[in-house]
Amino acid sequence: MSQAPLLIYLDGKLVPESEAKVSVFDHGLLYGDGCFEGIRIYNGRVFRLTEHLVRLYESARSICLTIPISLEEMEQATLQTVAANQLRDGYIRLVITRGVGSLGLNPYQCPKAGIIIIASGITLYPKEKYETGLNLITCATRRPAAAALSPQVKSLNYLNNIMAKIECIQAGCEEGIMLNEQGFVAECTGDNIFILKGGQFFTPTISSGALNGITRQAAIEILNDMGLSVREVTMTRHDIYTAEECFLTGTAAEVIPAVQYDRRPIGSGKPGPVTAEVMARFSKLANSTGTPVPYA
Ligand code: PXG
């Protein structure tokens, strides 16, 4: 990573991070009104950029938020921000805020959405956890019903997930399982979940309350390439208690094993061989595909 101050894209301009400031009247701050994406840069290429941008524009459309530039312009802005910071490996955070308005919820009082692009680094879990695996708990905090707030909207209001993350950390765990209102497994606080049982992989359906993760999709493709089928199911805690292997997927987490759930070992209690193969294949895929960054 470069040592110079980061250059942040803010509403059409690249500015030093010390000047990258937003108004206290931005509804992104006042109400968590807006949406975001997290994207990875591997080996000088941006991983699944179009898929992330499509999801960002869908989140925005769903909440009646007009992004003032086109998806193609956003793609160029993202690549330019990465290039300007000379990042070959890192993490991009795209943030769209409702913009500056008056006090009061009415989003139509905010004339123009704000655009922030940060290209930096991220370390979600300690490196050794990719070898030893994560411990998970069941979070008491549930995923909101889709009728309350669609889990497909990556909104700027992550309090639900943050409350669940607090529970994980207080329990001495890195991640946790969030159930939906019916008590079925939806996903983790910032990752999707896969389990292996009887030679087949299972992951919760999107309608269970899971975000349709881009890494989740990549994992499904990898498993299919390995000749393994993945069934999207209504998953229970029992299914995880009795799984042979378990791994989580997410842009920040990549593919990471989980070895304990609610104090019960998952399978042997060690990362499984199939999970190791999926991790290796994901690393190969991430480092060999993607949109090249136009470095100067
Ligand atoms: N579920 C939720 C609720 C997420 O927010 C995922 C699953 C995984 O989706 P992708 O498309 O990334 O495979 C996410 C995305 C963080 C952080 O800081 C987490 C995400 C994105 C950005 C930052 O923990 N998770």
Image: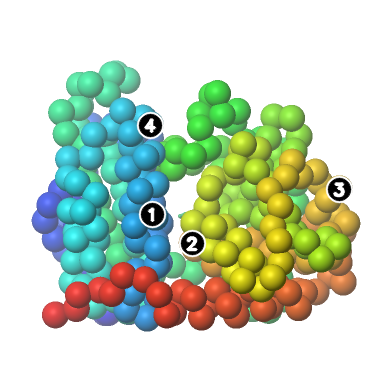
Query: Residue type at mark 4?
Result: Ser
Q: Is residue 42 left or right of residue 94?
A: right
Q: Position of residue 67 (x, y in %)?
A: 23, 40
Whether tag 4 and tag 2 are in contact, CB under 8 A, the answer is no
Q: Position of residue 11 (x, y in %)?
A: 15, 48
Check the image and report above or below for 252 versus 140.
below
Quadrant that contains the N terminus: bottom left
Q: Which residue is mark 3?
A: 238
C-alpha gap between disc 1 and disc 3: 33 Å
Identify which residue, 191 or 17, lies in the foreground: 191
Whether tag 1 and tag 2 are in contact, CB under 8 A, the answer is yes
Q: Which residue is mark 2?
A: 251
Q: Position of residue 206 (x, y in %)?
A: 60, 42
Question: Does the beta carbon of the residue at mark 1 sit less than 8 Å from ligand 1?
Answer: yes
Marks 3 and 2, the one that precedes in the sequence:
3
Q: Secondary structure at mark 2?
A: loop
Whether tag 1 and tag 3 are in contact, CB under 8 A, the answer is no
Q: Which mark is residue 62?
A: 4
Marks 1 and 4, the one that precedes in the sequence:
1
Residue 58: quarter of image = top left
Q: Secondary structure at mark 3?
A: helix
C-alpha gap between disc 1 and disc 4: 15 Å
Quadrant that contains the C terminus: bottom left
Whether tag 3 and tag 2 are in contact, CB under 8 A, the answer is no
Query: Residue type at mark 3?
Result: His
